Amino acid sequence: MVTVPEQARREAQRLREEILRHDYLYYVLDTPEVPDSEYDRLYRELQQLEAEYPSLVAPDSPTQRVGGQAAREFSSITHRQPMLSLNNAFAEEEAAAFDRRVREALGTDMVEYAVEPKFDGLAISLVYEHGLLVQAATRGDGYTGEDVTANIRTIRAIPMRLFDDVAPPLLEVRGEVLMLKEDFFALNRQQDALGEKLFANPRNAAAGSLRQLDPRITARRPLSFFAYGMGAAEGIPAFATHGTMMDYFAERHLPVAKERAVVRGLQGLLDYYQRIGSVRPALPYDIDGVVYKVNNLRQQQELGFVSRAPRFAIAHKFPAEEALTQIEAIDVQVGRTGAITPVARLKPVFVGGVTVTNATLHNQDEIDRKDIRVGDTVCVRRAGDVIPEVVRVLPERRQPGSRPYHLLETIGHVCPVCGSHVVRQEDEAVARCTGGLYCPAQRKQAILHFASRRAMDIEGLGDKLVEQLVDSGLVRHLPDLYRLDLDILANLERMGEKSARNLLDALEKSRDTSLARFIYGLGIRNVGEATARDLARHFGTIEALAAATSDQLQAVPDVGPIVAESILQFFGEQHNRDIIRILCTPSPEGGAGIVFQQAAVSAAPQVLAGKTFVLTGTLPTLSRDQAKAMIESAGGKVSGSVSRKTDYVVAGEEAGSKLDKARELGIPLLDEANLMGLLQ
Ligand code: 5U1
């Protein structure tokens, strides 16, 4: 081991601190002190010293921002505290109603609010332990997100170590990753010069950059970050207000919005809304509104949460931007579940910061209601990142001879992608392709669903790989998965021999499954995990299920006419029956060789059979998915809403309106320990 001279150690320390200071000045305060060439010189010097004395390399050294290899997929992370969303106010009256509710709940005449811009980026949780950034996760569904630590470390605005002499044992910072407008335009110019795909807007560019499996690519993308809240924490001061908490972040060199402020009462909120609205075009980043939060943290706690949003905060959105253009044609798109969506092809128009060339028309009812026709001049709206939509037609500009548009007639009741029948069920607004697994447009999603953890559990078959397999024609239908070999797989992009072997092992393992998992994996509309289990238990074989009549299907608990119809339609398509037959034919006879274990369906004692549960809030140790799986494997059902039919409500921390409803209806309440007791 090379001993490091004291002078080299001190020099490395000096260089690290100097580089971090320049990072802070440049990326957080936007007040650079030295030219890029000087920064590069310091960086190179540090790199050289670290190369000479590797023991000097610390995990939070600026040279260690980009590290590691490309991952195959992001692993998932359960948030220590759920990442909630905000309720929205679109009109002044809704903001006034928010202020009124807050005042009434707190029993006060005037409330102090912390106000800040609502960034149009991606919500992120950063976990610092003893000051060191140890984990970063996307919001995901609010309970579980994706581990993007390696990518987040490449963002220079995010400190890898908090600027703090005695950092707290735990601090979870919540905020938004985004791309500044200026950086977005520069990135697109560069993409254009390289002949690469352009990003539609800064938000897409930020999302696309953060979701790179290779952190070296993220490192080349100019991402920024702003903190706006706190999650789990230990050993931090007892802040009195949101404002002082944000000051604490800023002192530790975390970026916070310059535009944040503290105001009083409704008038203060509305003045801030106007002020930020008027400077919005000049701000360095895209925002889609402003956020109002009760400033006093004790009052925030008193107000609490309702379902998945805080009662103490609201986002006041800016109006969506609108523009006039003309519909050149109406095309149809086939979605994941076969939904056929009419899409207006528009004369390109610049609206909400991007050039819009198409807009969703949703379904036939929407087209009828707005009387949308090819050739019409229409007003289109784009709000945030949502798909642009047609707000209204300008009938005075309609061309003579135009005719109403009928989706099903236009496509001749046939899927334009696969030729299967397209049907619209009576109670549904959308028409659907019945092609299921056969339809290429639905195939990628169908394969991903089939491979998912709760279905066939084929580890390693992620979306990028499925895309490659389908696009290259290697996998056209599910049985093709079981024909892949080492040679083919190892030659795919980002697939070494080891990953290829792992995938083949996972495929092999998946051959031995349960009928319930298989039925669920088929992705039949309206057939979720619990229904799949009931169907497996009731019919016992896939052949019996495929041959069942509507009445026989409806004899299964919780299968009504709608679910029965979906199952009939699925098995009514010859291609679906063919695919199932090949999947279940033994390998030596040319099939995929899937076999069903008999006992797997109900291995656990069915102690909760016939009982319906509702889960609400955060349980101390179990995730929602885990609690659900345990209840279901004991024969119980988990429902999303509380009604008189609910037998138990399992409530955790921050339980919202479901708990109130349970109390109102006198439904027995359980905590996690009670639930475990029942299960035993
Ligand atoms: N600026 C800002 N955005 N944002 C989003 N603040 C903020 N706070 C949030 C969210 C979801 O949530 C907390 C109030 C819980």
Image: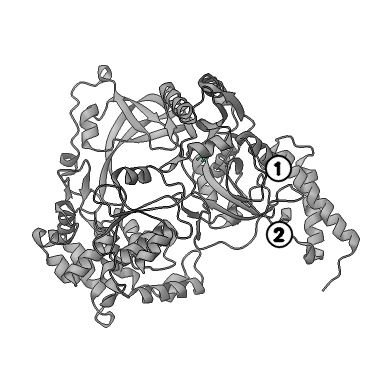
Residue 195 in sight: no
Q: Nearer the viewer, residue 585 or 95?
A: 95
Which color mode does the image show? Answer: one colour
- The N terminus is located in which quarter? bottom right
Please provide percent x and percent y for residue 456: 34, 68
Q: Nearer the viewer, residue 379 or 648?
A: 648
Residue 92 in sight: yes
In the picture, measured across the screen, residue 297 lies left or right of residue 669, that is: right
Going 17% across and 45% down the picture, which residue do you hit?
424
Q: Which mark sits nearer the N-terminus, 2 or 1?
A: 2
Whether label 2 lies within 8 Å of ligand 1 gets the answer no
What label sits on residue 120 in the rendered view? none
Above or below 540: residue 631? above
Q: Which residue is mark 2?
A: 59
- Residue kind at label 2, given as amino acid type: Pro
Please provide percent x and percent y for residue 445: 34, 56
Q: Secondary structure at mark 2?
A: loop
Please provide percent x and percent y for residue 322: 40, 25
Q: Which residue is mark 1?
A: 253
In the picture, measured across the screen, residue 623 lies left or right of residue 251, that is: left
Q: Secondary structure at mark 1?
A: loop
Occupied quadrant, residue 176: top right
Q: Marks 2/1: CA distance?
A: 18 Å
Q: Nearer the viewer, residue 297 or 598?
A: 297
Going 48% across and 32% down the picture, which residue do you hit?
315
Above or below 269: residue 410? below
Going 14% across and 70% down the picture, which residue do you hit?
544
